[in-house]
Amino acid sequence: MFAAKAKVFPLHLHPQVLQIVEGKRSDFQRDDGMIKPINIKRHSVTVQHQIKDGRGMTLEDFRKKAEEAGEALGRQMWENITAVVTEAVAETGNEVKVKKGNLTQEDLLRMIEAREHNFDEFGNPTGTLVCGSEFADEVKKRMEEWKDDKEFHAKAADITRRKKADFNEREARRRLVG
Amino acid sequence: MNERLVEDWLARANERSYQTPFAQSLLADGFEILRVGHSAHEHGKDVIAIDPKGKIHAYQLKDGNLDLKALEANWGQINALVETQVEHPALKGQPNHQPWLVVSGETSIPAEDRIRTHNITWKKRGFTTLRTLSGRQLLQRFAKMASNFWPQMPEDSHRLFNLYLTEGHGSLDRDGLAKLLSGVSGSGTQSGKADAARRLAAANLFASYAMSPFYAAKNHWELIQGWTITAAQIAWSAVNAGLPLTSWRATFRMAVEEALNSLQALAVEALQQNALGPGIGFEIDELTRTRCTICAGAIAVKALVDRYHGNPWEHEQMARETLERLLQNQRICIWGESAVPFLLAVSWAVDQIGGDYAADKVLYSIVDAIATQNSSHTSAKLAPPYDPADEANAKLLSRVLKGHKAMELQATASYALEPAVLLFARRLWRNVLAGVWSPITKVDIVRLVPESPIDLLLWTWGNSRGSNQSRKFSAPQSWTALLAEARRDEDVSLPDVLKSELDFALLFLLCFPHRLTTGLAKNLDNRLRTL
């Protein structure tokens, strides 16, 4: 079951979580200081199996049903994550609409621009772009096409420079003053 | 079935494990309990009580059957029970007392005959004659106390039997005990005040049954936890039922005293030579250091409690040397956030009995460990305070040996960072704190806020009480504002019993790591730094 879940929602894509062990209510503070309530809901999946008189499940049936449950659970978890991201994107206005098979340089630059960029202690970016496999293929294909486009790369480098400056400013604010 | 359990329990009980139920049964008969416990200074009197008519009674408790051989072996203590004066600060003058010999089994006829003969002599010499209580009479007393409060639901009975039959060298099922006590003490049931008070007495009785395997195994740390959970549940249920303090404090103190007795046993044992080293050769050092940390916390709390009672521990000097040695040899570790209370206790104890700046170094080690480990998205985080040491170490080993990623998948958050930072700010280490402020701001500070202060005493809130809030320190953070926050009084957030009973508050600190709020940390800091 868990292997099937991990196929749909791989562990390396799993966001880090604070397990809420107890409490009737829960909320969290965003980086901008705003307090947002957390709507705690119970999630479940249903798997059905036709019972026949005097006959149990075969091992193969059991495996299939376990996979079915795992996949459904993984899908539900993934949908929940994307729903939260979609809501945050709508709220911040960082939406980028891309026509399938028609990714433009402007689209990609806007996608880079919209994200918050973080860097490790050596200045290397630490972010990861998570997308579907079809879109990933398209991004790879376009990047290959644009690899010699100096103007595009200059624009991308300019964004990264600005994002690095933003990051440095953010980090510099993490101090005791007064 | 229930009677059989009590019979079996009493047959296995040692003197220590049935002293609290016995004293509780005296309380139920309207006695005032002056002292419960075994010590070198007891002069044969394990329990001292005053009956409703004002007469003083002294009891010596023995386990098993009493035959002539056992009587002769214990004669010195029995003689002291009858012939020496009862001494207690609450008693004035030289009052006479009624001596009792209590045995959990039966007294043989020759032994009874010997007592009868001695009674004639004692009577001639002006002493009150010795009376006896047998196991059969004890069973009747205990049955009367618990008659209406045996678990009614199958799952509660199952819990009691599971606890009773558990392996005493292992860990106490703290959730199971808390649920059992919650049922016995009648949380959520509508009952009169007299019934509510009797339920609290029964809670101590059932706690004794449930923890008997740990008495047999002399597993002191699990007993400390069990009795602290019991005391907390008694206080919560009493306040919830609207009982006046006078009607439940004695029952509550009985559980606290039992926890303190176990604390004393653990602390004394921990001071012995080689007591903390790996008992069996092959032991991973993380486990040895965990044991050292738990024992250091117990030693620290024992020293602080005795100072609070105005009677510094006779082993205080040895306690100081042991804590210093453990700190210097880096034997104190943070296995997870449930270790933080132990380090806080060590910090306060070193401050009191050791002085110098080692206390602040301990405090800083908490801030530094959480800020460093829990601020990075990619690193393994400290286990949350809900995980006891064994579970936290199991996660750590699963990560190392099996490549499990649970610790990496934890959010960059901490329950204990805020109290630790505020205590450190109180010590005015501004520049040191400034050095780690960047990682501190990357950790979400998790607060568990009860709807009513008394709920802090509950082992678990489930999803029906309180709120779980995640906040952040400011970036940039004003030092002045941080200092003001560190000094802000938060006593209003605490239940009265934590404010008025410092010894219980210290036990609570160690045993309820998930209830370490900034209010509790500040309150203890205020009181412990001025002992």
Image (tube, rainbow, N blue to C red):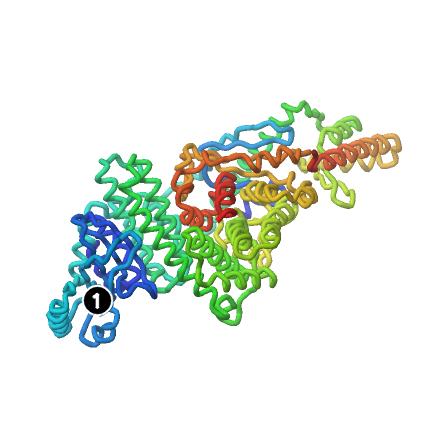
- Residue type at mark 1 is Glu
Residue B351: horizontal and vertical position, in percent? Answer: 55, 52
Q: Residues within 10 Å of mark 1 (few under 14, many from 20)?
A: many
Query: Which residue bears the numbered disc 1?
Result: B83
- Residue B411, image quadrant: top right
Q: Is residue B448 something that shows in the picture?
A: yes
In-image side of A161 versus B115 (left or right): right
Q: Residue at x 72, y 28 (%)?
A: A114
Residue B306 in the image: above or below residue B465: below
- Residue B196, image quadrant: top left
Q: Residue at x 21, y 52 (%)?
A: B50
Is A137 or B82 nearer to us in this picture?
B82
The number of numbered discs placed on residues in the rendered structure image is 1
Q: Is residue A61 something that shows in the picture?
A: no
Residue A115 in the image: above or below residue A93: below
Is A120 or B89 nearer to us in this picture?
B89
Read off the chain for label 1. Answer: B
